[in-house]
Image (spheres, coloured by chain):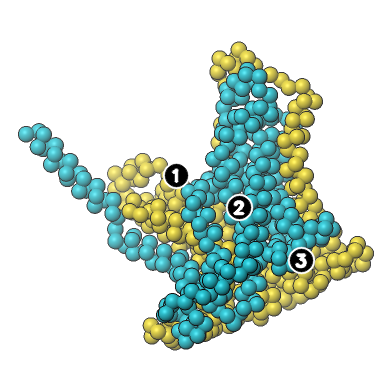
Chain colours: A yellow, B cyan
């Protein structure tokens, strides 16, 4: 492949096997040790601890087999948490996706101040979820700024218990999540749009294609890989959701308000309850659910994109 | 005559270009509304810190009137805030340095060496993307406790390095792979071994990738909450996210002061973002494409 004269004249010097092994070891071992110790090992330990009833002190000795798992799947609180995660996952895709696409298409026009706009819409993504939770939590209190604002503009009838009403709280959570992450989606889609060759649009316009025909037949298909990557990130994020819910609703209120997630369930019934075996089992359940969804998604949705990426990589 | 015509044409083109450059009013309207929504809650937090509790109670959605600086001064002159800033700075900086150094070394091996275990090594770290902190947090807490690192920033730093390695390596490998073989061979001719090549050529050439991954690691560590929640129970060890939440719980009736503390906690991340926004945005979108 490489036709450089230097390459021909001076073939790559072969390191001795022992020397190359030593170099590889020196360069790669530290990361492998840290990674295996703090990522792989804990995941394996979670699998192990899940079979015990354990308070987290000393060595687990009260082996209970699958009792923890039976307890999890029989607990209506876990069922609710699972449903909440599913709701959040679907609503995130359905609400944020189309809105982000429309915004990206609009902002993709050559307008003044585009760079500034891009910076400003990214602000929510940069701020910690803790700060987002505290800020929005105060805004949405029953006697908070949102209800006060609605009153002052004559829309008092729309006031609600945004955080404590089980019929509404999940939607409040969706608004907050969308606020936090939609800027990221827009930026991602803008990047995807900007990588589409300008010539395609010009050729289509010359052929008399309408704006909507261009969007449907050129923009969206070519934006496909970016959309699918974003959807994957959104799905995984939805399954792991903890910080926002924990901060705004706390470990107890989140279940009565209808916003508990598998992760808040794990912390409330594991660490906060001093039941580390049970908590580990919940962690395993979350991991397996995430893994099944991720592998299914990769298998059926991302496969084409990955194949293309690998092919390009080879070239 | 032709000169005059050219001039006219030029002027017309310029006007057309100017008109085109502004875009349609609808776009600006949507952009403004979108920005207002993005920044509204942020403004609420910042302005809330300049009000008194009675102002907030009487008029939750109102503006400071008169402006009060006591809340911000109280937070800034207290030791709690600065201690937590210091802790977060230590944790985020150490995490960033650790993940960049280890990530660069490993990416170098994966990108520049041919050996039987290369694919397996890459797959090992790629699999790490499937292991979010949430799943590992409980046994991780047990592990950190057994290592005697509870209430110790090292107990937060090491796991954060480990969990940031997958993304870092996946971003850096393409950068290192893109270095031409000619450069490596030229270095070899000059008598540089692999280590010399690494420090004299690879490190400088990978700066763009290093900066991108460093920023991502820093922001993630700075905003991290779940791990500190488990590991840092002693208030003197709190990082900012933990400190903000603790402050909000402790002073829950003192809304104005909570907003001031929250606002000040937000500023470092915003400043950091303003300084590196191109890298942050470019890094995230580049990572997805790559």
Q: In this figure, which residue is indicated by the disc labeled 3? A: A282
Chain under numbered label 3: A
Residue drawn at x 54%, y 59% is B268
Point out which mark residue A195 bears. 1
Residue drawn at x 64%, y 76% is B249
Do residues under tags 3 and 1 come within 8 Å of each other at their CB atoms?
A: no
Q: Relative to residue B156, is residue A271 depicted above or below?
A: below
Point out which mark residue B218 bears. 2
Disc 2/disc 3 C-alpha distance (Å):
29 Å
In this orientation, does residue A258 appear?
no
Q: What element carries label 2?
A: helix
Instruction: Indicate the quadrant containing the N terminus of chain B: top left, top right, bottom left or bottom right.
Output: top left
Where residue A264 appears, as percent x and y from the top left, is 69, 70
Snapshot quadrant of residue A70: bottom right
Where residue B112 appears, as percent x and y from the top left, is 65, 30
Establish whether labels 2 and 3 are both on one chain. no
Point out which mark residue A111 bears. none
Q: Relative to residue B20, is residue A3 depicted above or below?
A: above
Q: Is mark 1 on a helix, strand or loop?
A: loop
Snapshot quadrant of residue B189: top right
Disc 3/disc 1 C-alpha distance (Å):
42 Å
């Amino acid at each position: 492949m490489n036709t450089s004269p230097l390459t021909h004249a001076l073939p790559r010097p072969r390191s001795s096997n022992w020397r190359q092994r030593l170099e590889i070891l020196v360069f790669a071992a530290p990361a492998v040790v840290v990674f295996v110790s703090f990522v792989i090992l804990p995941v394996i330990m979670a699998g192990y601890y899940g079979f015990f009833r354990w308070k987290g002190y000393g060595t687990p000795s009260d082996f209970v087999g699958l009792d923890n798992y039976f307890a999890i799947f029989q607990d209506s609180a876990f069922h609710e948490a699972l449903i909440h995660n599913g709701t959040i996952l679907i609503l995130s895709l359905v609400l944020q996706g189309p809105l982000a696409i429309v915004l990206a298409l609009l902002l993709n026009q050559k307008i003044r101040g585009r760079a500034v706009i891009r910076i400003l819409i990214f602000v929510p993504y940069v701020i910690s979820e803790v700060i987002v939770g505290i800020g929005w939590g105060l805004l949405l209190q029953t006697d908070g700024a949102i209800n006060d604002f609605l009153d002052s503009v004559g829309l008092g009838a729309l006031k609600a218990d945004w955080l404590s009403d089980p019929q509404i709280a999940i939607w409040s959570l969706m608004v907050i999540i969308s606020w936090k992450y939609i800027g990221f989606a827009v930026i991602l889609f803008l990047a995807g749009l900007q990588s589409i060759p300008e010539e395609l649009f010009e050729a289509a316009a010359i052929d008399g294609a309408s704006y909507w025909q261009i969007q449907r037949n050129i923009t969206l298909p070519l934006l496909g890989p970016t959309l699918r990557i974003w959807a994957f990130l959104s799905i995984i994020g939805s399954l792991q959701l903890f910080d926002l819910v924990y901060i705004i609703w706390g470990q107890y209120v989140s279940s009565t308000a209808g916003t508990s997630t598998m992760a808040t369930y794990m912390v409330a019934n594991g660490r906060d309850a001093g039941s580390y075996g049970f908590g580990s089992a919940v962690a395993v359940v979350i991991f397996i659910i995430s893994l099944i969804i991720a592998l299914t998604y990769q298998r059926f949705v991302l496969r084409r994109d990955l194949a293309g990426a690998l092919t390009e990589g080879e070239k | 005559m032709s000169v005059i015509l050219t001039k006219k044409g030029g002027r017309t083109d310029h006007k057309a270009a100017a008109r085109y450059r502004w875009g349609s009013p609808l776009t600006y309207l949507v952009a403004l509304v979108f920005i207002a929504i993005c920044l509204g809650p942020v403004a609420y937090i910042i302005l809330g810190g300049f009000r008194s509790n009675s102002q907030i109670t009487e008029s939750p959605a109102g503006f400071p009137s008169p402006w009060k600086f006591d809340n911000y001064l109280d937070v800034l002159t207290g030791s709690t805030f600065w201690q937590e800033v210091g802790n977060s700075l230590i944790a985020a900086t150490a995490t960033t340095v650790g993940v960049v150094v280890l990530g660069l070394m490993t990416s170098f091996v994966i990108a520049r060496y041919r050996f039987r275990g290369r694919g397996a090594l890459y797959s090992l770290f790629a699999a790490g993307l499937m292991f979010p902190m949430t799943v590992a947090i409980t046994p991780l807490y047990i592990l950190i406790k057994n290592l005697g690192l509870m209430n110790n920033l090292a107990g937060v730093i090491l796991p954060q390095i480990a969990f940031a390695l997958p993304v870092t390596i996946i971003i850096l490998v393409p950068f290192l792979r893109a270095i031409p073989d000619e450069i490596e061979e030229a270095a070899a001719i000059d008598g540089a071994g692999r280590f010399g090549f690494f420090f004299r050529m690879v490190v400088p050439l990978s700066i763009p990738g290093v900066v991108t991954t460093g920023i991502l690691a820093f922001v993630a560590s700075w905003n991290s909450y779940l791990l500190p929640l488990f590991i840092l129970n002693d208030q003197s060890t709190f990082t900012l996210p933990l400190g903000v939440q603790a402050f909000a719980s402790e002073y829950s009736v003192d809304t104005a002061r909570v907003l001031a503390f929250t606002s000040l906690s937000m500023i470092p991340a915003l400043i950091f973002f303003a300084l590196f926004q191109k890298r942050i945005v470019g890094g995230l979108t580049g990572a997805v494409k790559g």
